[in-house]
Image: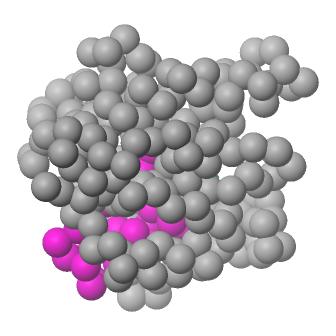
Amino acid sequence: MKKILVTGFDPFGGEKINPALEIIKLLPSSIEGNEIKVLEIPTVWRESIRVIEEEIKRFNPDFILSIGQAGGRTDISIERVAINIDDFRIKDNAGNQPVDEKIFEDGENAYFSTLPIKAIQKKIKDNKIPASISNSAGTFVCNHVFYGLRYLTEMKYKNIKAGFIHIPYLPEQVIDKDNSIGSMSLETILKGIELAIKAIFENEIDIKAIGGEIC
Ligand code: PCA
């Protein structure tokens, strides 16, 4: 039996809901005999990482998957890399707006996801849900958390594998926005995230599959 911690952010940037939070509320407590623990985290600089580290100490997971909203994206995007920079275009939920600051002074410039990103993408697409590999998690709180997770699992909690998935808006979030903005139903995203979790438990080592971009 393995254990995964799945985190979801609270709403930010004027939105009333965050699909990541809605998803973690619907996840089962186990999948194929493996345990799932969910954790709501604040969309707040530094505090977000602190809350996760407390839960790591309590739950001692084998894997951590953080989920965040990426408004405008059209599919489930599996993040490949976290970078050591905070450059917030908007204020976080506590009014912080760091610009061009390192997340951890003694960290690497970047860390790759240690989750099997290609296996996750394949599993989701094989089940007829659009998914892609993303090479940027942005420079806001999601990248901050992804980097923080990888820093902590690189420096302190070396037995834990960690990564990040961005999900689109829900349809109800785009009805008053530009019609061309992408969205995905809660049901479809939930299925996609459950498939991602299964792929994490099933693939100790990632598969080799094309998932790159030309530019
Ligand atoms: N998305 C934001 C932060 C919280 C969230 O769900 C981001 O992509 O940085």
Depth order, front residue of 144/7 = 7
Looking at the rendering, which quadrant does residue 134 occupy?
A: top left
Which residue is found at the position 59% from the left and 65% from the top? 41
The residue nearer to you, when weighing 142 against 18, is: 18
In reply to whether residue 194 is colored magenta, the answer given is no
Q: Which residues are magenta?
A: 143-165
In the displayed orientation, state which residue is furthest to the top. 128
Percent position of residue 74, x then y:
58, 23
Residue at 17% in and 27% down = 209
**The magenta stretch spans residue 161:** yes
Q: Position of residue 17 (x, y in %)?
A: 75, 43
Total numbered circles: 0
Residue drawn where x is 30% and y is 46% of the image = 30
Left or right of 183 on screen, residue 200: left
Residue occupying the point 32% across, 31% down = 195
| Residue 125 location, quadrant | top left
Depth check: give the residue in front, 72 or 202. 202
Seen in the picture, residue 160 relative to 38 is either above or below; the reply is below
Q: Is residue 123 left or right of residue 141?
A: left
Asked whether, in this view, residue 19 is left or right of residue 135, the answer is right
Which quadrant would the N terminus be assigned to in this image? bottom left
The C terminus appears in which quarter of the rendering?
A: top left
Q: Position of residue 126 (x, y in %)?
A: 27, 15
* Residue 34 x/y as whole percent: 21, 49
